[in-house]
Image: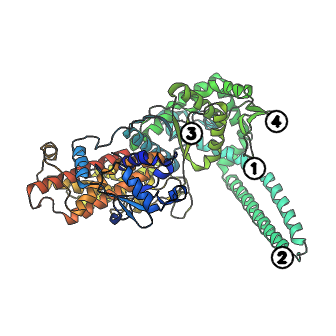
Amino acid sequence: MNLIELLRQRFAVSLATIDSDTAPLLAMIRPSQDAKFGDYQANFAMPLKAKLGKAPQQIAADVIAATKLDDLCEPATVAGPGFINLKFRDSWLEERLNLAVSDPQLGIAPTAQPRTYIVDFSSPNVAKPMHVGHIRSTVIGDSLCKILRALGHHVVSDNHLGDWGTQFGMIIYGIKHFADTQAYKSSPVKELGRLYKLVHKLVDYRESLAAIPTTQEKLAAREAELATASNQPPSADKAVAKKAAQALAKLQLQVKEQREALAALQSKIAAMDADPLLSKLVQAHPTIDADVLAETAKLHAGDSENRQIWHEVLPFCREEIQRIYKRLSVTFDEELGESFYHDRLEKVVDDLAAKGLARESQGATAVFLEGFDAPMLVRKRDGAFLYATTDLATIQYRQERWKPDAIWYVVDHRQSEHFDKLFIAAKAWGYTNTDLTHVKFGTVLGDDGKPFKTRSGDTVGLDGLLDEAISRALAIVQSSSSDLSPEEQQQVAERVGIGALKYADLSQNRTSDYTFSYDKMLQMNGNTATYMQYSYARVRSIFSRGNIDIAALRTSGALIALTEPAERALGLSLLRFEEALAEAVATAMPHHLTTYLFDLAKSYSTFFENCKVLKADDEATKNSRLLLCDLTARTIKHGLSLLGIDVVERM
Ligand code: ARG
């Protein structure tokens, strides 16, 4: 039951006689900030004043009179300048709660208009180690899939693996030149990781070396501009002088930046030159950057040796990431990597050209889009296709196979420009019936406010991250639940540690950067998984303490009755679950669900402080309160499961 939606449906009927576009008016029905203004508030009477030429209070009264509400609400009241205050009848809330008690779905009705969503998430470039950024896409994407499904939508989750890019050129080059056959045989994943890192380093050396003269040129140009600007006599005109000073400051900054960039390049080169082993390799592979690209191109062109290496290596790379998914309990319906679309790319470019959307530009083929400085390249001068070409082919394939209503791309915000261009190009290409959304997220930061790194300076590997969360959780569990066996403690610690990591990410507004902190995510108090898991265990402990067979009570005919204000507040909170899920879907933001769960846990705490449960005055009250406890526990459990988080019975 989506309470806000129900109210909006009722008002939609009466408002339709006033305005043809009711949506903005209905959006003005919101939960009340304060219980003294009822459960919900409708604020649409004020903006209707001009149109209807009546006092908003009168408009509010007229709309109330024309709206069927009496079966749901107490008589609506008009307050202040024309606010409508709405309060559900206790009897109606009780009826809904009692239905939810016997419903495995807790009263969540499948949507009347199921849509087909494709959620493209996680999508790491395999052959490279997965890092902390990938956890955001994986955790957010997985949760969105679960929430969509809980509301009755069709979902195809697709891991759009990067399994066809330059990183394979590096691996192939590495295998051909540096492989340690013995190491590769005994632990292929480790050896592949070593090869990738080594080749990447050597390529980086060449690219950095090549970047030095261009950076020097840029620096010289900026310095010359700065010298000219500094020699200008100051203008008497204040505004002109101010502009000149600003331009000067900007140039100074640019010079500083170029100097820093140059210094960074030079020190990188110097460090590698100082390493005798590395410098020997550097000397022996002077064209490695171009050679890696050539290996990638040969792979794409169907070279049999490179294809064979790719076929041999790919399963190891997939296995490696599967291990992480297993630890996170994340699965996908599809894992169609970039390679899957390779055969379509040529036709995509031809079709874009035939439709006049793509054209030749300096030997390459590009789609020119209004409002962007650079066009979207779909084929390079050397014939290679690009990331964007694959994404266009993927849209085409998904359309053919699933006819989705929406495709959600859960990807780092740094790819915004790519998706902006992609979506415009796809629309122009004819895919106008699918909502394409970049579900973007911010960067994971360390305590220092910089992108999260380990002490050694490497970006944190996901395994290490999970291990650390679990070992910290274990320390907490060992002190809080010393009566559990070591195996049980370990099991609880896994759920608490992984849960903490996921929840910390999901409880953020995904568009902002977020600061990674083990201490914060594992806090027992506050908006954390640990607190939610603890709340769940605490509610459930009542049943064992009171020796209650809660499943039997559900079907015993016992009923929920809302007498105390804290009971009513908890009951209302329980019934708002679906509204929270709908909000999470409308915005593609799982934090609406974590916020809801946290509020629910707080309502429960107030209820528990104010209402005796096992020692209630009479049996009927006790049973009613036990059922409220039961619904609370089930809602927390279900809610956490939609975030990909397990509960624990004891902690
Ligand atoms: N493999 C890409 C990366 O790691 C992300 C792919 C996202 N999905 C997509 N359809 N472009 O940056």
Mark 3 to mark 1: distance in Å? 40 Å
Mark 4 to mark 1: distance in Å? 26 Å
Q: Residue at x 9, y 62 (%)?
A: 617
- Residue under circle 4? 362
Left or right of 65, for residue 434: right
Along the line of sight, which residue is nearer the eye, 129 or 397? Answer: 397
Question: SS of the residue at dot 2?
Answer: helix
Mark 2 to mark 3: distance in Å? 49 Å
Mark 3 to mark 4: distance in Å? 30 Å
- Residue under circle 1? 209
Asked if the beta carbon under badge 1 is closer than 8 A to the nearest atom of ligand 1, the reply is no
Tell me which label, 2 or 1, sits earlier in the chain. 1
Camera sees residue 501: no
Tell me which label, 2 or 3, sits earlier in the chain. 2
Q: Is residue 631 above or below residue 431?
A: below
Question: SS of the residue at dot 1?
Answer: helix
